[in-house]
Image (cartoon, rainbow, N blue to C red):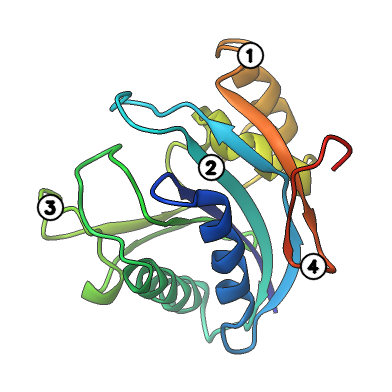
């Protein structure tokens, strides 16, 4: 088995409920075990700001090992893109609204740069015909909406190629972003498989 982290985001419709169903769908993938779920965060949109706040989280998954890391990562990415499409995801341009966004953040201790098959391609038609999977996820070190939930699960993790831990990166980004740009609003109730958004939750 390989430990991976997947980021989830949504801001169309009932986003917290979408992420709950998204977690359940990831857990139901063949051979996959759910290793943990971060807190739920409300995050200000970036780039295109005239849209509702996003809701974000990160899950830890144990996925079956493949003959090689690239094969395993691409198979998982294809599954993630299939889930996005099943949730109604379609292109609205970079940084636009999302029914469900699933990002492969890390894949074990591996650093990968491999060409994506069509099944794992971006939904953005403006992207180059040749698309690449980069793991750890490119840009994750500078996105507090990724770092905050990832630090809930793996604060001491140093992803391959990073010069710092996830928690150090989170603190660095938190120091330069607005305090309310990424706000924890709920915790995961594993027994009920849903977000607990009560004041004590």
**Left or right side of 133 for 161:** right
Residue drawn where x is 62% and y is 73% of the image = 24
Residue ID for mark 4: 192
User: Between tags 3 and 1, which lies in front?
Assistant: 1
- Where residue 148 sits: x, y (%)? 66, 35
User: Between tags 3 and 2, which lies in front?
Assistant: 2
Locate residue 174: give its quadrant: top right
User: Between tags 4 and 1, which lies in front?
Assistant: 4
Residue drawn where x is 42% and y is 44% of the image = 11
- Mark 4, other Cα within 10 Å: few <14 / some 14–19 / many ≥20: few
Q: CA distance from mark 4 to mark 1?
A: 30 Å
Q: Earlier in the sequence, mark 4 or mark 1?
A: 1
Residue ID for mark 3: 128
Report helix, strand or loop for mark 2.
strand
Q: Earlier in the sequence, mark 3 or mark 2?
A: 2
Res. 86 in view: yes
Quarter placement of the C terminus? top right
Residue ID for mark 2: 55
Q: Is residue 103 above or below residue 54?
A: below
Q: CA distance from mark 2 to mark 4?
A: 19 Å
User: Between tags 4 and 3, which lies in front?
Assistant: 4
- Where residue 150 sits: x, y (%)? 67, 44
- Mark 2, other Cα within 10 Å: few <14 / some 14–19 / many ≥20: many
Q: Which mark is residue 179?
A: 1
Q: Is residue 47 above or below residue 113?
A: above
**Left or right side of 43 for 58:** right
């Amino acid at each position: 088995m390989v430990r991976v982290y997947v980021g989830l985001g949504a801001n169309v419709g009932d986003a917290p409920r979408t992420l709950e169903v998204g977690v359940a769908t990831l857990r139901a993938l063949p051979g996959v075990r759910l290793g943990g779920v971060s807190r739920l965060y409300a995050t200000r949109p970036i780039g295109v700001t005239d849209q509702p706040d996003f809701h974000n989280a990160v899950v830890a998954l144990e996925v079956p090992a493949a003959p090689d890391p690239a094969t395993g990562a691409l198979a998982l990415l294809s599954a993630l893109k299939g889930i996005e499409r099943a949730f109604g995801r379609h292109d609205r341009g970079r940084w636009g609204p999302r029914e469900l966004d699933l990002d492969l953040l890390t894949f074990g201790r591996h650093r990968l740069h491999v060409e994506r098959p069509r099944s794992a391609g971006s939904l953005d038609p403006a992207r180059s015909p040749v698309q690449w999977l980069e793991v750890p996820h490119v840009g994750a070190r500078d996105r507090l909406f990724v770092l905050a939930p990832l630090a809930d699960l793996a604060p001491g993790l140093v992803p391959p190629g990073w010069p710092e831990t996830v928690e150090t990166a989170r603190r660095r980004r938190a120091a330069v972003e607005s305090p309310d740009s990424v706000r924890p609003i709920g915790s995961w109730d594993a027994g009920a498989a849903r977000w607990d958004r009560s004041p004590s939750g």
